[in-house]
Image (spheres, rainbow, N blue to C red):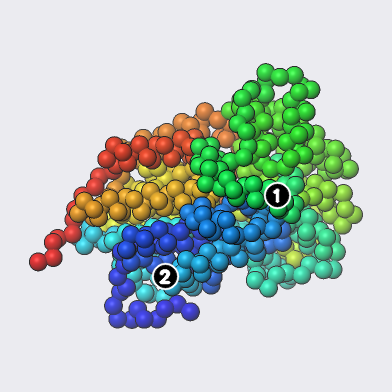
Amino acid sequence: MPDASHASSPRQLDVAIVGGGLGGLYAIHRLRKLGLKVRAYEAGSGIGGTWFWNRYPGARCDVESLEYSYSFSDELQQEWKWPERYGTQPEILKYINHVADRFDLRRDVQLNTRIKTATFDGATNEWTLRTESGEDIRARYCIMAAGNLSTPRVPNFKGIGSFKGKWYHSGLWPHEGVDFTGLRVGVIGTGSSGVQMIPLIARQAKHLHVFQRTANFSLPARNAPMEEERESRHKAEYPARRRAAYDTPFAIGGYPRPTQSALDVTEEERNAAYEAKWQEGGSISYLYTYTDLLVNKEANDTASEFARNKIRGIVKDKRTAELLAPKDHPIGTKRLCLDTNYYETYNRDNVVLVDVRSAPIQEITEKGVRTAEAEYELDVIVFATGFDAMTGALREIDIRTSDGAVLADHWEGGPLTYLGLMVSGFPNMFVVTGPGSPGVKTQMIASIEQHVDWIADAIDHLGRHQLDRIEPSPQAESEWVGHVNAVADSTLYPLANSWYVGANIPGKPRVFMPYVGGFDRYKKRCDEIVSKGYEGFTLSRHKAEVA
Ligand code: N01
């Protein structure tokens, strides 16, 4: 239950953190080491963020477990045992809970507490966060670690309230699970969530209709039990491996960097290379086949066509195979899915792919889904329709300052940040892996650690210099946003209608949000800015001396 001790005086903190996921938890640990009074506020009834909410069948990370884990404690990374190549949602949640216990983080997490407003008072130099139940929290600094894919969106289909069966969203999955046995199920959406759940639901349900608007590329994950020898080899070299990973664009190590263009080799050589990567499994591995797959359309066409031919080879029904073979975007420009038996699932007798691009969903009826062509009778509808990504969580909080700045207005034409870490006009508010950061295009925990370390160092720097305010200049912010866009425009990413550009949310401004210049380049820039005395930031002192 929310803490009810707020009736009288607001809680006073050094740092208030919004979110009790991987980012919020690491921020507690890191900032406590500076002797600061910190507390994280988490809307869920448990810690874990994404891994707390996304409990749909098949939910699993698409980055290998030995990489997708905290690096801040060598004892932790040595001792934790990952049972499989890719962690399942329950396993990752277990790990997060273990970390919280091991580092005694829970006492500074307040669960069941949604932050509704955050207001900066320039006179007192403090943020006041107000919870849904009316508790006020005051803090010098505020860290928004509310997640990028934490605001689930169900499309505004006509008639959704009339459906007599049950419906679920992938990102709000019931803790008790859902038994699909003997049921007629419809899954709407074929992004990473849909691709993971479809094979498992198909095995249980009496019948499954998959409503696909846009086909996505998916590669085999080749998940397997963790090989002991591989694990011990990796662990023996852990610190060096982590350092090497931070020198790569995706902050993921273990994949040799490509050295050749896809167009410098023969078709036979190329196809042999793609085949080897297909067999190896994993998305980075595939995209690392050649240097130019994400920047040269002609080069990318060769990798895209190889993947399409694989789909054609797996799916027996020719029409279904053609519908599943993506043609509207270059491979890798939308989040590349990893799967286990996704395409094979369409060979089952109880699975039908419904093309809702040519015949869009018109309404949800009492009985199921009606498209422009037919009505599909269903017992259960699963919305794997994604999230209001990157800006959704912050837009749900009314963030403003006593000077009249309102974040929603500042971001009306798309999010503006400096390094993805701070927003001009909103002093002392930090963002973890938000828009303008490479976060979502990297091994997320590496980005979280790098961001939180940077933030903690900045707060420490201010304290040591008797300063108490930091904010980016509008010019630094606008130059960073310009750089983020220029980098994106030098790649193929803008060719896809993805959540990276807000394309999945009707009316959302079309702006490329993640920084795709690479984690290595980004980290270097962050460090350079610090070494130049926090270039682009204004550091100052505001709080009057106590007499
Ligand atoms: O969401 P998505 P997601 N009518 O936005 C469709 C991470 N993640 O939850 O493409 C019909 O990718 C939509 O169609 P379209 C990962 O970063 C990671 O799957 O807009 N269809 C699309 O097919 C991922 O990228 C992991 O035409 C509609 C789907 O719904 C991100 O989360 C696992 C529709 C939404 O796909 C989001 O993935 C899961 C409509 N009105 C998620 N509206 C792993 O680590 C939307 N759609 C493995």
Label 1, secondary structure: give it.
helix
Residue at x 83% of width, y 60% of height: 203
Category of crowding for the residue at label 1, using alpha-carbon neighbours closer than 10 angstroms: few (below 14), some (14–19), many (at least 20): few
Q: Position of residue 529 (x, y in %)?
A: 33, 38
Q: Position of residue 515 (x, y in %)?
A: 48, 39
Residue 143 in the image: above or below residue 3? above
CB of mark 2 near ligand 1 (< 8 Å): no
Q: Nearer the viewer, residue 463 or 301?
A: 463
Q: Which of the two labelled residues, at mark 1 and mark 2, occupies the earlier sequence position?
A: 2
Residue at x 77% of width, y 33% of height: 275
Q: Measure the C-alpha gap from mark 1 to mark 2.
A: 38 Å
Q: Is residue 144 visible?
A: yes
Q: Position of residue 293 (x, y in %)?
A: 63, 29
Which disc is residue 108 wearing?
Answer: 2
Q: Is residue 376 visible?
A: no
Q: Residue furthest left?
A: 547
Label 2, secondary structure: give it.
helix
Q: Quadrant of residue 264?
A: top right
Judge left or right: residue 487 versus residue 403: right
Q: Nearer the viewer, residue 484 or 518?
A: 518
Residue 469 in the image: above or below residue 517? below
Which disc is residue 402 wearing?
Answer: none
Residue 479 in the image: above or below residue 441? above
Judge left or right: residue 191 versus residue 2: right
Instruction: Write down the residue under mark 1.
Output: 229
Judge left or right: residue 272 versus residue 125: right
Q: Quadrant of residue 289?
A: top right
Tell me the kind of residue under disc 2.
Asp
Tell me the kind of residue under disc 1.
Glu
Q: Position of residue 19 (x, y in %)?
A: 46, 62
